[in-house]
Amino acid sequence: MNTIELQQTLPAVFAGRDSIISDVWHQLLTLKRGEAYLVEAASGTGKSSLCSYIYGYRNDYQGIICFDGKNIRSLSVHDWVEIRKSSISMLFQELRLFTELTAWENVQLKNSLTGFKSKKEIKAWFEQFGIADKWNTPVAKMSFGQQQRVALVRALCQPFDFIFLDEPISHLDEENGRIMSRILVEEADRQGAGIIVTSIGKHLELNYTKTLKL
């Protein structure tokens, strides 16, 4: 997948508003593979909805979203399975980890579907993130910042053309934010992938191609 295009897209809940001032909603916007985008937004302007629309998790929007020119409303269940397995990776704001499972078990659930990373590579990321000692710890017993790091490792355990990160460092300090940026960029560069980060203030420090106001 090389492009994601939004054509006059707008959350259905916003349809009654008189005017929408946005670089994303009600615009013609093309996100290109290999580039990095920052989507800055105030709370309640639809940034998490945007991620859910593109991931096919929700379809309560007006307008059109296309992957390489194909309207995503026409995609089958099988198509979505393949897209989520090999084209789009998503780090949701609420993380969607299984809290009763350990950090490693959460990551392994994804990696077992793709076989994309070796256990050695995954352990190296845990060490870089300073959570190697949490390998066998149930996620419920970890801080939210630690969980964010586990969720990113899980998101990287698949091939992708685009990776979306919804407020990925809301609970991280500056040093861990820098580590996340480095690991993310290294992996995206390796795959020639596009990066889309959403933020309501604190965001990953990357060399963004474009900053979009939601």
Image: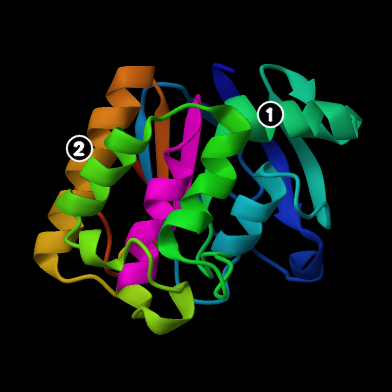
The residue pinned by badge 2 equals 207
Query: In the picture shown, does residue 195 fall above or below 53?
Result: above
Query: In the picture shown, does residue 212 fall above or below 86?
Result: below
Residue type pointed to by label 1 = Ile
**Chain-order first, disc 1 or disc 2:** 1
Please state the extent of the stretch shown in magenta in the rendering.
146-166
Residue type pointed to by label 2 = Asn
Which label number is shown at residue 17? none
At which x and y percent is residue 151? 44, 57
From the viewer's perspective, is 146 left or right of 32?
left
From the viewer's perspective, is 192 left or right of 27?
left
Which secondary structure lies at badge 1?
helix
Residue 78 shows up from this direction: yes
At which x and y percent is residue 5? 63, 29
The residue pinned by badge 1 equals 83
At which x and y percent is residue 40? 39, 59
Indicate which label's residue lies in the foreground, 1 or 2: 1
Residue 5 shows up from this direction: no
At which x and y percent is residue 154? 46, 48
Q: Nearer the viewer, residue 169 or 65?
A: 169
Where does the N terminus fall, quadrant-wise? top right
Q: Nearer the viewer, residue 173 or 85?
A: 85
Q: Residues within 10 Å of mark 1 (few under 14, many from 20)?
A: many
Q: Residue at x 66, y 17 (%)?
A: 68
- Is 201 one of the magenta-colored residues? no
Q: Residue at x 27, y 45 (%)?
A: 123
